[in-house]
Amino acid sequence: MKYYAIIVGAGSGKRMQTNVAKQFLLLKDKPVLMHTISAFYNTPVKPEIILVLNPDAHAYWNELCSQFNFDIPHLLVNGGEQRFHSVRNGLMAIKEDGFVAIHDAVRPLTSAKLIVKSYSSAEENGNAITSIKPSDSVRRVISETNSEVVNRDELVLIQTPQTFQLEQLTIAYQQHYQASFTDDASVVEKAGFRINLIEGERNNFKITYPEDLELASLLIK
């Protein structure tokens, strides 16, 4: 059975308040994206890695690979207008059947244990979507002056990797893009497949704001 990992990093990362896209910012001794790719490569599964980047960033990424002597094998693919299109471009590069993990480029602290679990659970159930329970109280905003409490025991926060049987993704990504497609699970669910949740990890957070990078720097030590 073949295993693949599509690493999606085609965004600009404006919320990081920096001119450099967040996947290229330094974390400890190398760019965030290199930690993310290494997390998948350094597992017993050793999936084939497909990296999706904005076409304008390809040359810069190749320069970084040379600068940091980064030689983990991966296929570089053009990103699209939305994340949906970027993932679809990555899927088009896959030629053999298997299982595909789709992962955010800016989640560099994903453990090997979680990656392996996502593949094994997808093999058993068709897909595996990592999630964690919210630790804070949650309220739903009704208006500017009104809100109501929501039972957090009925909620989960979705992470990546989100891992699927290739056939599910192939069928799902034949759909036209919709604004309601917030992640791969929402695309696959819309195509009629049941979503299987697995427990994620607190440290598997997405680097979005400057303080996230600071926290990741502490944890990676």
Image: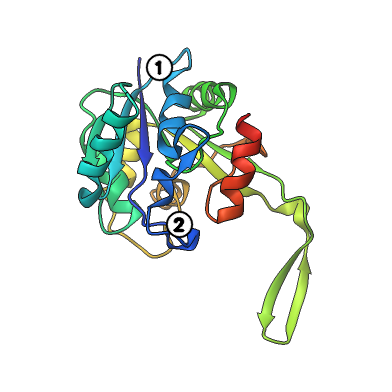
Q: Sequence-wise, which precedes: disc 1 or disc 2?
A: 1
Q: Is residue 34 left or right of residue 115?
A: left
How many neighbours does mark 2 have within 10 angstroms: few (below 14), some (14-19), or many (20 or more)? few
- Residue 182 is tagged as 2
User: Residue at image x 30%, y 31%?
Assistant: 67
Residue 159 on image: x %, y %: 55, 44
Q: Is 216 left, or right, of 33 in this rendering?
A: right
Residue plotted at (45% across, 39% down): 32
How many residues crowd around disc 1 within 10 Å: few (fewer than 14), some, or many (20 or more)? some
Quadrant occupied by the N terminus = top left
User: Which residue is at 73% across, 53% downward?
Assistant: 154
Q: Which image quadrant for residue 139?
A: bottom right
**Image coordinates for residue 130, horizontal then vertical, percent:** 57, 38
183 above or below 119? below
Three-letter code, disc 1: Lys
Query: In the picture provided, is 149 more to the left or to the right than 219?
Result: right
Image quadrant where one finds the C terminus: top right
> In the rendered structure, which amino acid carries the disc numbered 2?
Thr
The answer to which quarter of the image holds residue 218 is top right
**Residue, disc 1:** 46
